[in-house]
Image: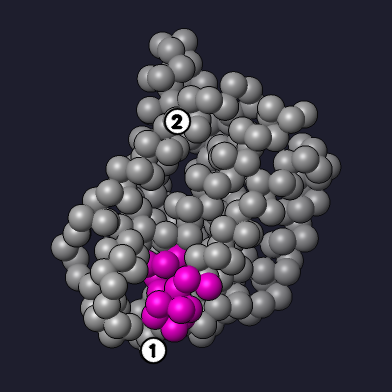
């Protein structure tokens, strides 16, 4: 399973892992099992950045933590967020919305979504007054687990593209395995209360999926990206609530 793990890192991050891996259906399928793990690694690095610069002040540490999330992923999911917002808020028919989402140019709603995305994360991280590395690690893990859920149970909006490929090769058992392992990890390593952000991420993914089905009849790679950004924000917000509660 080394090749699928490497492929998962190469696909979801910009970490310099210069190892050639066959991009075949088997490796693509098996790599999906590691999406939550890759997400947690991204969150751990971001949390480490926060701790490394925390002596410089909460604002600077929070800004650099958000920046690290962007650089670690190469803005992959943010691009999907901007394309999704441009398409969904264009008030056009399905085919036109899909065409807008494929357009490499960014529109006003895409620009606004990126600004709000960064601002939300910055404000939330700066207000997470304790256990920030754990919150970032699990928020990034939650979002990638939800990505695997959409791949496992969603339907593609078009016959070509990344979403169609990911869904075609997917085996639903990998989501079940990842979900059980992830829940057990959170419960026994952290606290059952830390499952609340995961539930919040699930509800956010469900709402976005319903919106996407209504607008374009399915999911695309851009919607995957939008879901990842949405779930990171929702999860961080839920952690803020959990920390104030317990």
Q: Is residue 104 left or right of residue 29?
A: left
Figure quadrant of residue 36: bottom right
Determine if the magenta segment contains residue 44. no
Query: In the figure, is residue 95 to the left or right of 225?
Result: left
Occupied quadrant, residue 173: bottom right
Q: Nearer the viewer, residue 12 or 57?
A: 57
Name which residue lies at 52% across and 70% down. Answer: 209
Query: Nearer the viewer's eye, disc 1 or disc 2?
Result: 2
- Is residue 112 found left or right of 233 in the rendered image? left
Residue 37's label in the rendered image is none
Which residue has dot 1 on it?
Answer: 159
Q: Assign the N terminus to one quadrant of the image.
A: bottom right
Q: Residues within 10 Å of mark 1 (few under 14, many from 20)?
A: few
Q: How many residues crowd around disc 2 within 10 Å: few (fewer than 14), some, or many (20 or more)? A: some
Pick the residue in front: 84 or 36. 84
Q: Position of residue 52 (x, y in %)?
A: 47, 19
Mark found first going from the N terminus, 1 or 2: 2
Q: Position of residue 58 (x, y in %)?
A: 46, 17
Q: Residue at x 44, y 37 (%)?
A: 121
Residues rendered magenta in the picture = 210-224
- In this view, the residue in front, 92 or 51, is 92
Location of the C terminus by quadrant is top right
Secondary element under disc 1, as helix, strand or loop, is: loop
Mark 1 → mark 2, Cα distance in angstroms: 39 Å
Q: Is residue 66 left or right of residue 79?
A: right
* Identity of the residue drawn at 60% across and 54% down: 201
Q: Position of residue 12 (x, y in %)?
A: 44, 57
Q: Circle 2 is placed at which residue position?
A: 123
Tell me if I can see residue 83 in this picture.
no
Q: Position of residue 123 (x, y in %)?
A: 45, 30
What's the magenta bit mostly, secondary-structure-wise?
Answer: helix
Name the residue: 45% across, 73% down: 212
């Amino acid at each position: 399973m080394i090749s699928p793990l490497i492929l998962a890192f190469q696909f979801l991050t910009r970490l310099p892992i210069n190892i050639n891996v066959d991009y075949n259906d088997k490796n693509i399928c098996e790599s999906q099992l590691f999406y939550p793990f890759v997400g947690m690694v991204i969150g751990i690095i971001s949390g480490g950045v926060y701790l490394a610069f925390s002596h410089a002040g909460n604002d600077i540490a929070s800004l650099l933590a958000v920046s690290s999330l962007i650089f670690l992923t190469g803005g992959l999911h943010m691009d999907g967020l901007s394309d999704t917002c441009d398409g969904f808020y264009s008030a056009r028919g399905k085919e036109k919305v899909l065409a807008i989402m494929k357009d490499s140019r960014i529109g006003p709603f895409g620009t606004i979504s990126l600004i709000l995305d960064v601002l939300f994360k910055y404000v939330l991280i700066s207000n997470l007054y304790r256990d920030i590395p754990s919150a970032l690690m699990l928020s990034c893990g939650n979002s990638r687990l939800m990505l695997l859920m959409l791949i496992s149970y969603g339907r593609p909006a078009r016959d070509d593209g990344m979403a169609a490929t990911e869904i075609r090769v997917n085996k639903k058992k990998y989501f079940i395995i990842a979900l059980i392992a992830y829940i057990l990890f959170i419960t026994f390593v952290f606290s059952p209360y830390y499952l609340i952000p995961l539930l919040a991420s699930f509800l956010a993914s469900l709402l976005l999926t319903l919106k996407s089905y209504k607008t374009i009849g399915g999911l695309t790679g851009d919607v995957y990206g939008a879901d990842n950004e949405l779930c990171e924000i929702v999860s961080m917000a839920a952690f803020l609530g959990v920390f104030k509660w317990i």
